[in-house]
Amino acid sequence: MTTPPESGPTLDAASPIPPDIEAADEPTKAPLAIEDWLTVIIMGALALITFANVLVRYFTDSSFAWTEEFSVFLMIMLALVAGSAAVARDRHIRIEYFSESGSMARRKRLAQFGALMIAILFTLIGALSIRMVWDDYRFEETTPGIGLPAWWYSIWLPIVSFAIALRAVGLMVRRGRKTNYKSDAPAATGKKNDGKGDAK
């Protein structure tokens, strides 16, 4: 007879998540579903454009060459939106030898410093790109593919950059409040066991 699966979150159909792995995202003021749904929508649009190109090329020996402009824009947006989700979930690239070692206070300061640098970087990108958007609008620049106003595309760079900066600020605040880190988990478990032993 097979034993029923354990209750609780699972990594797959048969493997429950160990207790030291967080099963859900950290609570944030702006829901992380925003980035998730934007990612789904952008990926869906890219898939539809690509599939339509394949069908048209197969049946008519031609292609929607003008859709390349949309595809490039959507891929850039996908990278920015995914970057925002990575910052909000604290999944950006780091050197774990430094970020996961040392005292809790040291790790907390490093996490806050990393989030602060991300916030500063994307604030600068957003601020500097505003001038680019203004130039596109003022000089009536158009795209080379289908002649759309260039600022229709470029305006999204400062918007998403400031959104990533805000996500980084939120991460910095949350890391300042966080007290439980990975290397501290065994110690905390030991304290709980000791308490149970004393009670018995």
Image: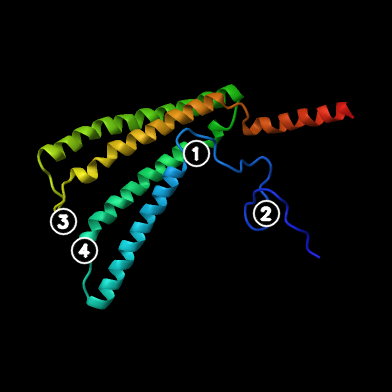
Residue indicated by mark 4:
65
Q: Amino acid at mark 4?
A: Ala
Question: Residue 163 location, x and y as percent?
Answer: 36, 35
Q: Earlier in the sequence, mark 4 or mark 2?
A: 2
> Is 102 drawn above or below residue 17 in the view shown?
above
Badge 1: how crowded within 10 Å, few (<14), some, or many (20+)? some
- Could you tell me which secondary element the residue under label 4 belongs to? helix
Q: Nearer the viewer, residue 109 or 156?
A: 156
Badge 3: how crowded within 10 Å, few (<14), some, or many (20+)? few
How many angstroms separate mark 1 from mark 4 (CA)?
A: 37 Å
* Quarter occupied by residue 83: top left
Residue indicated by mark 1:
89
How many angstroms separate mark 2 from mark 1 (CA)?
A: 23 Å
Q: Amino acid at mark 3?
A: Ile
Question: Residue 26 location, x and y as percent?
Answer: 54, 36
- Could you tell me which secondary element the residue under label 1 belongs to? loop
How many angstroms separate mark 1 from mark 3 (CA)?
A: 37 Å
Q: Relative to 28, is 125 on the left or the right? A: left
Q: Earlier in the sequence, mark 1 or mark 4?
A: 4
Residue indicated by mark 3:
146
Q: Earlier in the sequence, mark 1 or mark 3?
A: 1
The residue drawn where x is 16% and y is 47% is 149
**For the view shown, which residue lies furthest in the left direction?**
139
Question: Residue 103 location, x and y as percent?
Answer: 61, 24
Badge 4: how crowded within 10 Å, few (<14), some, or many (20+)? few
